Amino acid sequence: MHLANVEVGKRTTQTQTQTALHAMLGSILLERGSAAEALSELARAKTMCDGDPILSSLILDLSRAARAKLPETGAPGSTAVDARTAIETAIAHAQSAPASDSEQEKDQVLLVQREGHWFRVPDREVVHCRSRQTVRALLAKLAEYRCSNPGMPVHSEELRTIGWPGERMSLGSARERLKQAMRVLRRLGLEQLVVWKDGGYLLSTDISIELC
């Protein structure tokens, strides 16, 4: 799948140019085996395509292919790194003009693998949580609940059951363990996005979220 056959030469708006470049970078990263990074670039393109039927269809196909190759098993080769550098330079050039408030908001998407294996905060690298069983389970629940019940917290007792299934512990110990797990999530990159509210935790509604 390539963008080479897509005619974008006549698309002159800043947003359309950025969309095509993000999608092109996603396509190259996917071919080089960097599925997670490819998916993050395609998610950016998806939020910016503004209903363009050709780009929307292409981005959807590429995203499906990227999800089929998750989890990412290797780093991109040197050719992919060179391609990333060149295309990111083009993206930076396309972004040289001030973006509108709506365009800036569209670019703010938190990506979370639906089982909590990894997440990506905008403008940061992918963070892998596969080896952190408790953190992974809690992240998956918070992300799922954020999508289905935005602004509503998952009660701390439910999170305790999810994070430490079958374990018997005192109320004080349960609270401390949960606080520690939330501190880990914040330290990994979700600093201001993990919020305490009404006896539970939630992922902030200040940012869009997409499950992968």
Image (cartoon, rainbow, N blue to C red):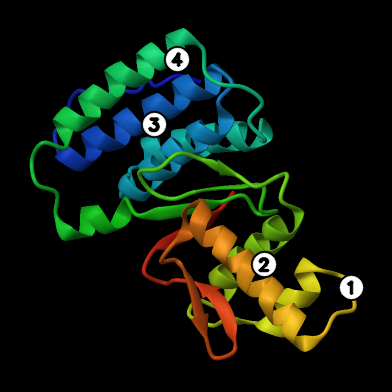
Q: In the rendering, which numbered label is found on residue 80?
A: 4
Q: What is the secondary structure assignment of the residue under circle 4?
A: helix
Q: Kindly report the distance in space between the C-alpha atoms of the residues bearing marks 4 and 3.
A: 14 Å
Q: Looking at the image, is mark 4 or mark 3 nearer the viewer?
A: 4
> Within 10 angstroms of label 3, few (less than 14), some, or many (20 or more) residues?
many
Q: What is the secondary structure assignment of the residue under circle 2?
A: helix
Residue 68 horizontal side relative to residue 83, left or right: right
The disc labelled 2 sits on which kind of residue?
Lys
Q: Which residue is mark 2?
A: 141
Q: What is the secondary structure assignment of the residue under circle 3?
A: helix
Q: Which residue is mark 3?
A: 23
Of 111 and 54, the residue lying toward us = 111
The residue sitting at 39% across, 64% down in the picture is 207
Residue occupying the far top of the picture = 79
Q: Kindly report the distance in space between the C-alpha atoms of the residues bearing marks 1 and 2.
A: 18 Å
Q: Kindly report the distance in space between the C-alpha atoms of the residues bearing marks 3 and 1.
A: 45 Å
Residue occupying the far left of the picture = 97
Q: Residue 148: horizontal and vertical position, in percent?
A: 58, 73
> Within 10 angstroms of label 2, few (less than 14), some, or many (20 or more) residues?
some
Please determine whether, in this image, residue 190 is positioned above or below residue 176.
above
Q: Which residue is mark 1?
A: 167
Of 146 and 53, the residue lying toward us = 146
Q: What is the secondary structure assignment of the residue under circle 1?
A: loop
